[in-house]
Amino acid sequence: MDDSPAPLTIALSKGRIFDDTAPLLHAAGVVAQDDPEHSRKLILGTDRSHVRLIIVRASDVPTYVQYGAADIGIAGKDVLLEHGGAGLYQPLDLQIARCRLMVAVRNDFDYESAVRQGARLRVATKYLRTAREHFAEKGMHVDLIKLYGSMELAPLVGLADAIVDLVSSGNTLKANHLRAVEEILPISARLIVNQAALKLKRKTIQPMLDAFSAAIAGSRRRQVPAQA
Ligand code: ATP
Ligand code: MG
C-alpha cells in the first residue's frame, strides 16, 4: 500500500488570519513558500510537498471547504455562523483573531429606551443571519440593511439606528462617536475540515489537527502562567 501522505489543500485569508495562523502551521511543520501580502499568487506551495495553501476572501473560506476544493480551512466564527456550517466539521477553536460581535449605536441614541418601548430599529450589518437571530430572540422588530464594510458609518449618516459588527479594542467605535450596547457573542477563528476529506485523508489530516491542538495548548500555557 502507498504510504505517502495524501495531498492537502488549506484555505485561508490573508491579513490577520494568515498572520495568526502562520505560527500554528509552523508548529505543524508547514511553512509557506511565499508571503501572501507580497505575492499575487493565490496558490502557495509549502516546504511540505503534499501541502498547499489557497488564499481566498475570509467569507469564502467555508465555501471552498464545504465543496471540497480545500480539505481544511481557517475561518472566523462570525463567518461560520453566516455560512451555516453545512458539510463542515469544526474540531478546533484556534483562539486567534479574537474579538466580539456587538450591537453599537451613536453615543446620543437611547438604545435602552428604544428596546423598552419596542421601537422598530433599522440595523445595518454584514451579518444578516446572526443579527436576525439575535433580535428575534430579544423579541425585537428590526429592519436589516445589508452592508459589506465600514458599518460604523451607517448610524452617522442616518442609514441605520444601530449596527452589528466586530469590535476588538473599541477604538473605531470611539473615533466615530459610537458605543457598544450589547455583546452578541465572542468570536475567534476555527479550524474547519471537509467531512468527506476527514474520512478519506484521516492519516494526513489527524496529525495536523493534533499539532494544532498542541500548539494552542502551548500558547495558552504561556498566556496563563501557573501560580507560583
Ligand atoms: P475583507 O476585509 O476582505 O472585506 P474581512 O473583513 O472579513 O474581509 P478580515 O478583516 O481579515 O476580513 O477579517 C477576517 C476575520 O478576522 C473575521 O472574519 C473575524 O473573525 C476576524 N476579525 C475581524 N476583525 C477583527 C478584529 N478587529 N480583531 C480580531 N479579529 C478580527
Ligand atoms: Mg476587514
Image (cartoon, rainbow, N blue to C red):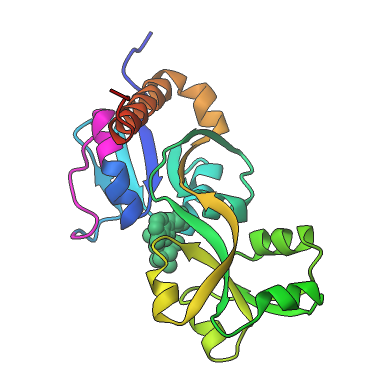
Placement of 217 over or under 101, stated as above or below: above
Residue with the most extreme front position: 228
Quadrant for the C terminus in the image:
top left
Residue with the most extreme bottom position: 157
Quadrant for the N terminus in the image:
top left
For residue 58: magenta? no
At which x and y percent is residue 3?
33, 12
Placement of 199 over or under 136, stated as above or below: above
Nearer-the-camera pick, 34 or 133? 133
Q: Is residue 128 left or right of residue 101?
A: right
At which x and y percent is residue 194?
53, 36
Report the residue at 43% width, 82% height from top: 176
- Quarter of the image for residue 96 reads top left
Q: Main secondary structure of the magenta part?
A: loop
- Quarter of the image for residue 72 reads top left
What residue range appears in magenta?
A: 23-38
At which x and y percent is residue 180?
54, 68
Report the residue at 79% width, 68% height from top: 140
Report the residue at 41% width, 18% height from top: 203
* Tally of numbered discs: 0
Nearer-the-camera pick, 226 or 192? 226
- Visible residue check, residue 14: no
Report the residue at 30% width, 39% height from top: 52
Nearer-the-camera pick, 2 or 15? 15
At which x and y percent is residue 82?
61, 56
Ligand 1 position by quadrant: bottom left
Q: Is residue 158 left or right of residue 149?
A: right
